[in-house]
Image (cartoon, helix red, strand yellow):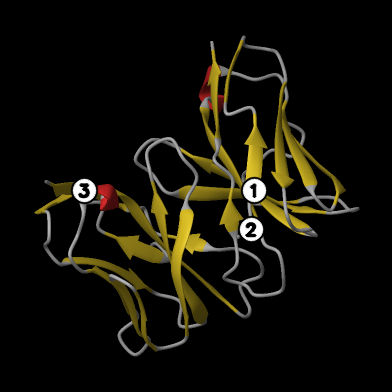
Amino acid sequence: GAVVSQHPSWVICKSGTSVKIECRSLDFQATTMFWYRQFPKQSLMLMATSNEGSKATYEQGVEKDKFLINHASLTLSTLTVTSAHPEDSSFYICSAGPGTETYEQYFGPGTRLTVT
Amino acid sequence: QKEVEQDPGPLSVPEGAIVSLNCTYSNSAFQYFMWYRQYSRKGPELLMYTYSSGNKEDGRFTAQVDKSSKYISLFIRDSQPSDSATYLCAMRGMNTGNQFYFGTGTSLTVIP
């Protein structure tokens, strides 16, 4: 089956620093990847759509200068949280699909970010 | 009004019980309906998907979609302790772009 990995799985950083999270599709190519944020006991909130070779599309209310997304290849997208603050602490999850079937979104294991 | 409504639970059932999980939605353009299972501190795992109305069965899991009522269900037969997780419904339409609309998830515990 399609596998999506994320790295790191857990990161703690100090306020004001930047953190990069990687999302990789291991056995398929993905022209589009999605980044979500999830707070405890809440559902997934789509942050942005990452498009290979072009700029990401951000959802309303998501600061594009704070959450930098780069989709450099068909198997890798990165999310960089710049100048992190404690309110950025959350569970970040990416997803990707191997083909054109719209239901085929496979999620990574998530990255838990804690900003102290 | 939220696009997708899902009772967060928690739902607690004895092992072997039939579990019914449900979501309602408001956008009649939704065509693809998915159910994901999410274990604690893990990413969601696709369980089942259905296109348009109808039923779909996969082992102990059955997904139902009633577009006329804007209501979808997931049934789990012979529930097992390993089914304990949060179940998220998700849906999208042909004209909703790439965005999936998720329910808040229902937390299920199956007691041995």
> In the image, residue B50 lies at what x, y percent?
45, 79
Q: Is residue B112 left or right of residue A70?
A: left
Residue A18 vertical position relative to residue A21 in the rendered view, above or below: above
Q: Chain of mark 1?
A: A
Report, in whole angstroms, how far the alpha carbon at label 1 lies from the one at label 2: 7 Å
Q: Chain of mark 2?
A: A
Residue B103 vertical position relative to residue B82 in the rendered view, above or below: below
Residue A31 vertical position relative to residue B82 in the rendered view, above or below: below
Tell me whether the residue at label 1 lies in contact with that at label 2, contact meaning CB atoms closer than 8 angstroms: yes
Please state which amino acid type lies under the numbered disc 1. Val
Which residue is nearer to you in this view: A6 or A113? Answer: A6
Q: Are marks 3 and 1 on the same chain?
A: no
Q: Is disc 2 placed on a helix, strand or loop?
A: loop
The local crowd at label 3, few if under 14, some if 14 to 19, many if 20 or more residues have their Cα within 10 Å, is some
Q: Quadrant of residue A9?
A: top right
Q: Is disc 3 placed on a helix, strand or loop?
A: helix
Please state which amino acid type lies under the numbered disc 2. Ala
> In the image, residue A96 lies at what x, y percent?
67, 56
User: Which residue appears at 60% of the width and 61% of the height?
Assistant: A105
Residue where numbered disc 3 is placed = B81
Report, in whole angstroms, how far the alpha carbon at label 3 lies from the one at label 2: 26 Å
Residue where numbered disc 2 is placed = A2
Residue where numbered disc 1 is placed = A4
> In the image, residue A56 lies at what x, y percent?
79, 50
